[in-house]
Amino acid sequence: MGLIDDGFRFLDRWGTNAASLGWTALDVFGVHPSAPAARYDVMGLVPLISGHDVVAITITSATIRRTSGAELVWLRRAQVGAVPLWDLVPADLRL
Amino acid sequence: MTDWSGALERAFAAHLQNRGSGGSRGSSALRPSVSAELRGGSPGTPAINEGVPGVPERRLGTPGTPEYRPEVLGSRPPEQQAIQALAVHGTPGTPRTSSSDGASQVLDQTSPEPNAPVLRAQPEWVEGVSLLARASPLPAYSAREWD
């Protein structure tokens, strides 16, 4: 599963909770505008899910559980210089 | 409290319906990995669970019981009165339990305020992901990483 499925699954399961906890679009979908797949320092949660499961979110963090059972805790932070993923879709790539 | 989860599902269902009608991905573009609830609808048919987001039932106890606290319509700010009006009061003879007290408190604490983030953020997120789903993969991502 890729970004799109991860995005839909997150919104389906956690979207309301995240919004209620004050999460922003950059917290969830933020990426660096020129290196969206490489700049982990400004990457939001969904681009990091990589097909795994988000099992918990709080006001400050989210927990991703990998298929191996290992858990990764992602911490909310200021996404300086990030943009929402959808801002990178140029008009000529929109089907 | 407004059923934002339901609203979100309906937005997804609408998105899925719209996807099927055009574009290079064809008319059978229902995403297999989207939750089963979202796959219930098909193009041309109404989305499942259609309806106006409602406020969960809230029982306030009954007249004559010590716990009864009458709630007067209009006692809240105007923007909350519609929500207040939808609250369901208990019927005579229905005892008020301690659990319903807790539920009422939670509802009061989580009722969406006007212009609250939950009202603004989610439509933007749904719209954004829907745009991504319609777009070709960005150069930084492979097709596998994208879909």
Image: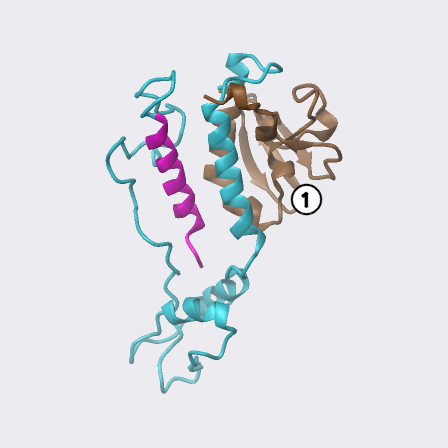
Q: Main secondary structure of the magenta part?
A: helix
Q: Is residue B81 left or right of residue A69?
A: left
- The percent coordinates of residue B98 (x first, y second) are 45, 70
Colour of chain B in the image: cyan
In the rendering, at what x and y percent does residue A63 appear?
A: 61, 35
Q: Can you say which quadrant of the picture contains the N terminus of chain B?
A: bottom left
Q: Is residue A51 magenta?
A: no
Question: Visible in this render: residue A15?
Answer: no
- As drawn, the chain in brown is A
Please determine whether, in this image, residue B67 is positioned above or below residue A40: below
Q: Which chain is indicated by disc 1?
A: A
- Residue A49 at x, y percent in the picture: 58, 27
Q: Name the residue under label 1.
A: A60
Please, what secondary structure does the residue beneath circle 1 have? loop
Quadrant for residue B114, please give it.
bottom right
B6 in magenta: yes
Residue B59 is left or right of residue B93, and the answer is right
Q: Which residue lies most toward the bottom here?
A: B64
Q: Where is residue B132 in the image (x, y as percent from the top left)?
A: 51, 26
Q: Which region shows up in magenta? A: B1-19
- Residue type, mark 1 in image: Thr
**Depth check: A85 or A49 in front?**
A85
Q: Residues within 10 Å of mark 1 (few under 14, many from 20)?
A: few
